Image: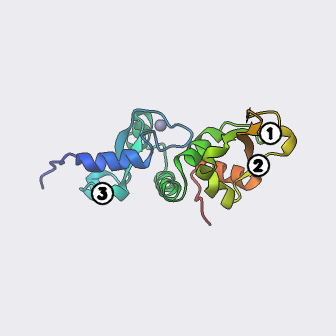
């Protein structure tokens, strides 16, 4: 049987990279540049499909494909979580999740009130809450008008970030 492997179509590569925000799909990594990895190995599936491809940095690609040091179940969870994050949340919300991995529990996040809509799903889902008045009163005034509010992750929000980092499903 011929083992010729066709190259991955450019549009598919772009879609897979875009899904991961052009950074390694492993939440604790997020390095660039990225390569395209097959979740089930090419040798087994013999095809390139969106659902079986994920963007990984060269280091994690090697650890997964060559060294077998990352379980396939984890890679599948990262992939599933990417789909949820992209489908439901804004770019700002996704960036906040990435950044929050290394934050202390009560870290305050200044958000300009003009872009509040970009965190509306986090607020709807109870992942983020406004910090109290006393704390936001000291920042973000222009000409006497409050322009910035401080937010922080709720306990549910911190659990969400932890699940994302640890390759656990983000929905029950
Ligand atoms: Zn990586």
Residue at mark 3 to residue at mark 1: CA–CA distance? 48 Å
Mark seen at residue 136: 1
Q: Is residue 167 above or below residue 104?
A: below
Are discs 1 and 2 less than 8 Å apart at CB? Answer: yes
Residue 68 in sight from this viewpoint = yes
Q: Quadrant of the N terminus?
A: bottom left
Residue at mark 1 to residue at mark 2: CA–CA distance? 9 Å
Q: Is residue 80 left or right of residue 142?
A: left
Q: Secondary structure at mark 1?
A: helix
Instruction: Quickly name the residue at label 3.
Output: 49
Q: Earlier in the sequence, mark 3 or mark 1?
A: 3
Q: Earlier in the sequence, mark 3 or mark 2?
A: 3
Give how far across and how far down residue 7 sits, in percent.
Answer: 20, 45
Q: What colouring method underlies this structural image?
A: rainbow
Give how far across and how far down residue 92 sits, in percent.
Answer: 56, 45
Q: Is residue 140 left or right of residue 133?
A: left
Q: Please, which residue is most extreme toward the right here?
A: 134
In the rendered image, which quarter is residue 57 located in?
Answer: top left
Residue sitting nearer the eye, 53 or 146: 146
Q: Is mark 2 within 8 Å of ligand 1?
A: no
Instruction: Quickly name the residue at label 2.
Output: 130
Rendered residue at 54%/51% (across/down): 90
Give how far across and how far down residue 120 sits, in percent.
Answer: 63, 55
Q: Please, which residue is most extreme toward the left here?
A: 2
Within 10 angstroms of label 3, few (less than 14), some, or many (20 or more) residues?
A: few
Rendered residue at 15%/48% (across/down): 4
Q: Secondary structure at mark 3?
A: loop
């Amino acid at each position: 049987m011929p083992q010729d492997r066709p190259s991955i179509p450019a549009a598919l590569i772009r879609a897979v990279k875009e899904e991961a925000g052009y950074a390694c799909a492993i939440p604790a990594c997020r390095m660039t540049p990225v390569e395209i990895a097959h979740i089930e190995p090419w040798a087994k599936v013999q095809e390139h499909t969106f659902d079986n491809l994920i963007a990984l940095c060269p280091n994690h690609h090697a650890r997964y494909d060559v060294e077998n040091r990352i379980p396939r179940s984890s890679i599948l969870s990262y992939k599933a979580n990417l789909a949820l994050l992209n489908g439901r949340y804004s770019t700002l919300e996704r960036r906040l999740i990435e950044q929050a991995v290394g934050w202390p529990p009560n870290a305050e996040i200044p958000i300009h009130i003009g872009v509040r809509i970009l965190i509306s799903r986090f607020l709807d889902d109870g992942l983020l809450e406004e910090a109290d008045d006393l704390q936001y009163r000291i920042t973000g005034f222009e000409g006497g008008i409050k322009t910035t509010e401080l937010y922080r992750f709720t306990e549910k929000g911190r659990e969400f970030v932890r699940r994302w980092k640890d390759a656990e499903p983000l929905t029950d």
